[in-house]
């Protein structure tokens, strides 16, 4: 696998040498007792970085999102999210299984929800209709191609949601990519959210982990939900040590991934055998569609035979995701291979 150019996801990265050293030498304790100093430092650092009162380290982004949904809802209510959201498509229906809520989806152009789109989906205040309890946004939006919701759009949503008494959660798995694209701090970009979940194990390169940030009250309750979901870890400082490096060192290099994604996207755009929305390629994700009902799975197999790994995300759609484990030179090689295969299609 190490000889292949792996563009399936930014989750495939291996820990950096600095992470491996930090993990091997981490000071640890029992985190269920709140006694792991490295976990405590990671949580304190994350809360400060996002301008929130508290944070909690969790094994996965799915767990962090679902804990947040449970915090803000009661059984029998609705959660509004975009129709291609990770919460809706890739979290094993846990919004219903764990929080007891149903998801009401809204399709946004390029995956971006605006207040008028959300407002139209809010349930009327009548006793025989499931009530809207929570709005969830995703920034960047994975299945829309890594698109970025602008700050002004979110500011309107924060203000209007507050006016009607609805909390707002951010699935910010790749929020550092969004911040890099907009040249803003994550604190600025997320200031109006009640809770934010972000991944350490995607573009930031940690081997494991996500963090949920919010108010002290919310995070205190989230610890109960984490334990209920089996996320109470013991000497988790070994993992948190890598997370500290992710927070402190990895965000600065994300524009490199955005540049290599653009390189790949432009190579695809030059070929008539594929269609791509170049304006939607804002961060490290490239999604394109094969013309004439081309077989995405077969195309990915052909890429693999040439040394490139990619994901078929539909019958005719292919996704590339760039990350620090693929260099610009490797992406240039992948772009050449992609161009050759598309030209022969």
Image: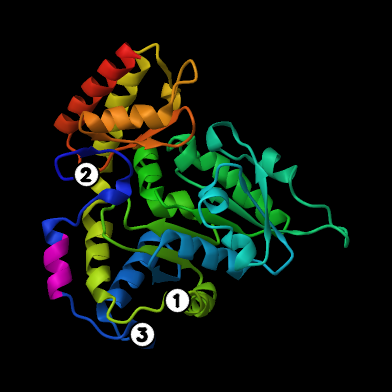
Query: Between marks 2 and 1, how big is the CA–CA gap?
Result: 31 Å
Which residue is nearer to you in this view: 161 or 244? 244
10 Å crowding of disc 2: few (<14), some (14-19), many (20+):
many
Residue pointed to by mark 1: 230
Which residue is nearer to you in this view: 23 or 244? 23
Query: Between marks 3 and 2, how big is the CA–CA gap?
Result: 33 Å
**Residue 240 position by quadrant:** bottom left
Q: How many marks?
A: 3
Q: Are marks 2 and 1 in contact (CB under 8 Å)?
A: no
Q: Which residues are magenta?
A: 19-25
10 Å crowding of disc 1: few (<14), some (14-19), many (20+):
few
Residue 165 magenta-highlighted: no
Q: Are marks 3 and 2 in contact (CB under 8 Å)?
A: no
Asked if residue 39 lies left or right of residue 2, the reply is right
Residue at 88%, 60% (x, y): give it: 128
Residue pointed to by mark 3: 34
Residue 272: image location, x then y, percent: 39, 11
Residue at 48%, 59% (x, y): give it: 196
Residue 147: image location, x then y, percent: 46, 36
Residue pointed to by mark 2: 324
Tag 2's secondary structure? loop
Nearer the viewer's eye, disc 2 or disc 1? 1
């Amino acid at each position: 696998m190490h000889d292949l150019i792996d563009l399936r996801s930014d989750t495939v990265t291996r820990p950096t040498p600095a992470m491996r050293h930090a993990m091997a030498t981490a000071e640890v304790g029992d985190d269920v007792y709140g006694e792991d100093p490295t976990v405590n430092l990671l949580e304190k650092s994350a809360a400060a970085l996002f301008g929130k009162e508290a944070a909690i380290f969790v094994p996965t982004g799915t767990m962090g999102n679902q804990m947040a949904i449970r915090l803000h809802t009661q059984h029998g209510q609705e959660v509004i999210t975009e129709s291609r959201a990770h919460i809706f498509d890739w979290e094993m229906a846990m919004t219903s299984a764990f929080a007891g809520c149903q998801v009401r989806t809204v399709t946004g152009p390029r995956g971006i929800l605006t207040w008028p789109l959300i407002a139209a989906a809010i349930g009327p205040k009548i006793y025989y209709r499931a009530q809207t309890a929570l709005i969830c946004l995703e920034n960047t939006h994975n299945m829309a191609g890594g698109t970025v919701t602008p700050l002004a759009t979110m500011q309107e949503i924060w203000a209007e949601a507050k006016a009607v008494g609805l909390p707002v959660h951010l699935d910010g798995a790749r929020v550092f990519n969004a911040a890099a694209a907009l040249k803003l701090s994550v604190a600025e970009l997320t200031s109006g959210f009640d809770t934010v979940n972000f991944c350490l194990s995607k573009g930031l390169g940690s081997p494991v982990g996500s963090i949920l940030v919010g108010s002290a009250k919310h995070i205190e309750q989230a610890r109960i939900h984490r334990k209920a979901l089996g996320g109470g870890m013991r000497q988790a400082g070994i993992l948190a040590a890598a997370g500290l490096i992710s927070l402190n060192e990895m965000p600065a290099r994300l524009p490199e991934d955005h540049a290599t994604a653009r390189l790949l996207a432009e190579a695809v755009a030059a070929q008539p055998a594929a269609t791509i929305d170049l304006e939607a390629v804002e961060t490290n994700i490239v999604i394109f569609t094969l013309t004439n009902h081309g077989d995405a799975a077969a195309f990915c197999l052909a890429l693999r035979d040439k040394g490139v790994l990619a994901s078929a995300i539909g019958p005719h759609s292919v996704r590339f995701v760039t990350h620090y484990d693929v260099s610009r030179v490797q992406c240039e090689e992948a772009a050449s291979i992609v161009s050759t295969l598309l030209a022969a299609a």
